[in-house]
Structure formats: structure tokens, C-alpha cells
Image: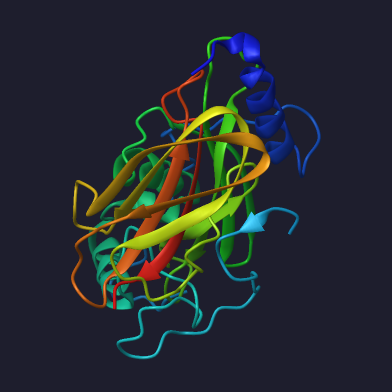
């Protein structure tokens, strides 16, 4: 990695300001893990009340109710985390209604940060720089504070959707909207066997891309490839990674790069299934 004099910090600053700048004018607000209060849980008897490259299908403002045993959200969005099936999401709703269990599932910001920090293992990604909500969809710009930057830098735009029915349907990560680091191969929702060819495009200097394959319930990757030298202006990158996973599981493929001002400065994810 070159020192900051190669101009990486300006690139990250442009990324952070460019992604976070769409929407309201003025400096972006920063959210940590102290979210706005969650809705008061109802009683158990109460009724349930482009531009960037995207790794998820085009957003819709409506959400179809999953059929029995159907795991996809709205018929085509991959449930990456924290739930794997609609039954798991519904089980949490019942517990929440009964005793207020884990209210953070109702906060898109906290869910996106927990996905980045806890599930993907990116400890430095600790804040929501900007959140845009559109019906059942939310885009949370997650990032970090660099020592020499005046504002938080955006590492990724995490796409979430409501999983289930009612005002207390939990948020579920379904992918990322990608800019200067994209993950376009394998295709979103594809059946992906091992070894898997992973690729996309990147803009940057002296980049080092790490690829991991993960699934909920595992603290460690089920496959990993590190590290691929890359760089340039919208330059193509590609790598192959081997992994071991149970058939039919939804898997999260993640590409990340960093090392200039933070261990992880940008990342992108996509969802696939093991055949």
C-alpha cells in the first residue's frame, strides 16, 4: 500500500461525500448504535398493524407476502441477514410482541451496522452516515471516521427490506448498491457452486481485494481468497474462491478493500444460493 500522499484519502472523501450527498443538503448526520426509539410492541392479542451499480434487483414500493416455505423477499430478494427464512422472521415478531425481544430489528440503521460489523466482521464500520427509506426498502450508508477526514467516510450502501407483514416486520439485509467497488459476478440470486468466480470493477490506487463467502449461523467464512492486487479507473477485477456450504443455503459473497486509512474502506456484497 502507498502512503496517503498517493491521493487515496481524496478518493475516499469523494466516495463518502458523493454517496452520502444525495438527498438533503448540508452535512450528513451520523448515527451510532444508539438508535431512535423502537415502536412500542403491541400486546400478544393485538392485530399486526440507479446511478450506482446494484447487486440487488430494481426496488419496488410494494412487497408481496411470501408463500409458505418461500425464503425470498417479494419473490426475488435474497434474505442475507439476520434471518434466513420467513418463519425465522415471524418467530422474532411473536417474541417481540410478547416481551419486546431484540427491538433493534426494527431499526434499519442498527441492522445495517450489525451486518457490517458483526456478521461480516468489519469492526471499524461503526456508524450510519445517511439513511434513505422508501416504503419497505431502506438504504443505509454505513461508514467510519478517518483520522484526517472532516466527515465520516462511506464504505457501502446497504440495501434492506422489511421481511414479513405489519408495522413490526423486521429489517433484512438483501444486498448493497455499489459505486467505486462493485461486485457483479456471480449474478444476484444465481446458483453458485465451488470454486466460484467472483468479479466486478474498482477505482483506486494500490487496492487489495479480499473475497469471502459467508452464511448466517457461522462466525467464520465458509470460503475466502486474499488478497487480489487491483487498481485503476473503473478497472475490472476477478478472483476464484473455494467454499464449503450445505446445499440450498443462501450465501453472502463479499468483496472488500482497504489498508490506506482503515482496515476496510469499501465493501460490496451479493446474494447467491448453493446448488
Horizontal and vertical percent position of residue 181: 58, 43
Q: Is residue 134 left or right of residue 166?
A: right
Front residue of this view, candidates 91 and 77: 77
Front residue of this view, candidates 194 and 137: 194
Q: Residue furthest right?
A: 25
In which quadrant of the rendered view does residue 56 lie? Answer: bottom right
Q: Is residue 68 left or right of residue 262?
A: left
Q: Is residue 240 above or below residue 170?
A: above
Which residue: 68% across, 37% down? Answer: 20
Horizontal and vertical percent position of residue 27: 73, 27
Q: How is the image coloured?
A: rainbow
Front residue of this view, candidates 93 and 127: 127
Q: Is residue 41 above or below residue 88?
A: above
Q: Is residue 91 left or right of residue 136?
A: left
Horizontal and vertical percent position of residue 205: 60, 26
Q: Is residue 39 visible?
A: no
Which residue: 42% across, 64% down? Answer: 271
Horizontal and vertical percent position of residue 117: 36, 38
In the picture, the quarter occupied by the C terminus is bottom left
In which quadrant of the rendered view does residue 165 lie? Answer: bottom left
Front residue of this view, candidates 117 and 250: 250
Q: Is residue 125 above or below residue 174?
A: above
Which residue: 40% across, 79% down? Answer: 47
Q: Is residue 124 visible?
A: yes
In which quadrant of the rendered view does residue 172 lie? Answer: bottom left
Which residue: 49% across, 73% down? Answer: 77
Q: Residue furthest bottom?
A: 68
Q: Is residue 31 above or below residue 112?
A: above
Numbered label tally: 0
Amino acid at each position: 500500500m502507498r502512503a496517503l500522499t498517493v491521493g487515496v484519502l481524496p478518493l475516499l472523501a469523494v466516495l463518502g461525500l458523493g454517496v452520502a450527498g444525495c438527498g438533503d443538503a448540508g452535512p450528513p448526520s451520523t448515527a451510532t448504535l444508539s438508535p431512535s426509539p423502537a415502536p412500542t410492541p403491541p400486546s400478544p392479542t393485538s392485530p399486526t398493524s440507479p446511478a450506482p451499480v446494484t447487486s440487488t434487483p430494481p426496488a419496488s414500493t410494494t412487497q408481496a407476502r411470501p408463500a409458505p416455505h418461500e425464503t425470498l423477499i417479494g419473490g426475488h430478494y435474497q434474505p442475507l441477514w439476520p434471518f434466513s427464512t420467513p418463519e425465522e422472521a415471524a418467530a422474532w415478531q411473536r417474541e417481540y410482541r410478547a416481551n419486546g425481544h431484540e427491538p433493534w430489528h426494527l431499526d434499519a440503521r442498527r441492522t445495517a451496522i450489525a451486518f457490517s460489523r458483526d456478521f461480516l466482521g468489519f469492526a471499524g464500520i461503526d456508524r450510519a452516515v445517511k439513511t434513505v427509506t422508501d416504503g419497505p426498502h431502506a438504504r443505509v450508508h454505513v461508514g467510519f471516521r478517518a483520522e484526517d477526514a472532516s466527515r465520516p467516510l462511506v464504505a457501502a450502501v446497504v440495501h434492506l427490506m422489511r421481511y414479513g407483514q405489519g408495522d413490526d416486520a423486521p429489517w433484512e439485509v438483501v444486498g448493497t448498491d455499489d459505486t467505486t467497488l462493485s461486485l457483479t459476478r456471480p449474478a444476484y440470486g444465481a446458483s453458485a457452486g465451488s470454486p466460484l468466480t467472483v468479479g466486478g470493477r474498482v477505482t483506486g490506487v494500490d487496492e487489495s481485494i479480499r473475497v469471502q463467502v459467508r452464511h448466517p449461523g457461522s462466525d467464520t467464512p465458509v470460503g475466502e481468497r486474499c488478497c487480489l492486487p487491483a487498481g485503476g479507473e473503473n478497472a475490472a477485477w476477478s478472483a476464484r474462491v473455494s467454499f464449503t456450504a450445505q446445499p440450498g443455503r443462501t450465501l453472502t459473497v463479499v468483496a472488500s478493500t482497504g489498508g490506506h486509512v482503515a482496515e476496510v474502506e469499501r465493501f460490496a456484497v451479493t446474494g447467491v444460493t448453493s446448488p
